[in-house]
Image (tube, rainbow, N blue to C red):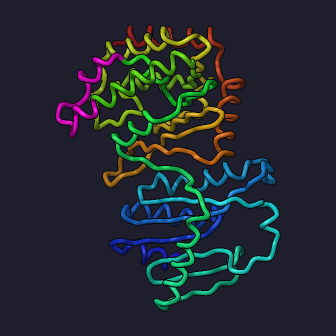
Amino acid sequence: MFEILAQEAQEEQGKIQIFMDPDFSSIIDYLASLGCRNHSLQIEHIFCMDNTQQLMDNGQNYNLYCLEQILPLYTCGCLYNAYYFYDTMFTRKNTLEIFSVMLITSRYALLFTRDRSQGILFGNRASVQLYRNIFGRFYPSVSSFADKVTDVISQIQRLISFDFGEKDIYIFQPLPCLTYCLPEEFLDRYLYPDLPGREHVLGMLSDFIRRTKDSFSERRPYFLFTEQGVLDFLETGRVPDYPDYVYAPFSIRDRMFLIQEIMKKCLPQQLCMLKKNYFYSNRSISIFSSPHSGYLFLPVCNEADSCEQIYLDITESHLVSSFYDFLLYLKENFCYSPDETGKVLRRILQEFHTRV
């Protein structure tokens, strides 16, 4: 099976279609390794999600587990698209199923059982085309798991169109959302002069900043962040959710100004600093969640072996609910009090000012 997948990954327009639950970890991991080395590889993945709130034996939400399993495929750099349908997973896996897993490449179609003890390999062109057609007939009955957006223009367009109409918004990232307090004149000051389509990007960012300020002023979201995230910003002048290739690092003076501004703009209870740098990563993962919508910003590999951010719009309702509950749990159990958060931020600024 791995040899078949490796052969397809070497094709100029390699395409792999899989009908398989995400709990086949060895296959998922191998596909992610192929995707890291072959960014033109296209993977289309259809799988089942649970339509109940029943937990797995280890107490984990199954749909959240599915996201955990397939994230490496979204972030490895290949062209990965996932689709899902609903069933009652915990009943379904106890029923008799013959060759419930299907894997198709341009040369082969492989059907096998969940325990991988038995399977059938088709290598003739007619059979492979037959199963490609069968796979294609699934699309009207499945839903896209998430929308992946990789370029800055599309990210801005998506964020501008995002519905901030709800209250009880939670935003988790290493640094509080500085867009909320960013002066518009900073755009012209820091956007690279030779940025392609600079004027267009400038206009879009101006609209996004104004809209964000209006929405956040009215709805007062909670910002969950880490001390290390603030320290990193003060050291580098880089905001994790702004692509590095778009703007120059902020000056030291402006770095301190922005931290002071976010403290002025927000009510004390909006700034929720995690204790002891819980959940910190030097490659930023950002989570936005409200009761009915959510998205992720994730690092994704590129051909230069560096990382860029991608936008992942989460559309599955159980996942949105899980993220919301998770962030609420973080706020209530792992964060400093508002007074403690203010003291830590003032201490950080004082120490940084003294040092520089």
Among the 4 quarters of the image, the one containing residue 155? top left
Direction from residue 120 to residue 231 in the image, left or right: left
How far across and down, in percent of the image, does residue 322 sit? 68, 40
Q: From the viewer's side, name the closer residue of 298 and 152.
A: 152
Q: Quadrant of the C terminus?
A: top left
Q: Nearer the viewer, residue 157 or 79?
A: 157
- For residue 288, say whether it is visible: yes
User: What residue lies at 41% left-to-right and 24% top-to-bottom?
Assistant: 233
List x then y, in percent, for residue 149.
42, 47
Residue 231 visible here:
no
Percent x, y of residue 148: 46, 50
Q: Nearer the viewer, residue 307 or 220?
A: 220
| Residue drawn at (21%, 40%) of the image | 196
Q: Is residue 319 above or below residue 112?
A: above
Q: Number of marks in the image? A: 0
Extreme residue toward the front, this view:
140
Locate the N terminus by quadrant. bottom right
Front residue (pair 322, 317):
317
What's the magenta region? 183-202
In the displayed structure image, the side of residue 225 where residue 78 appears, left or right: left
> Residue at horizontal 52%, vertical 33%?
163
Q: Is residue 341 magenta?
A: no
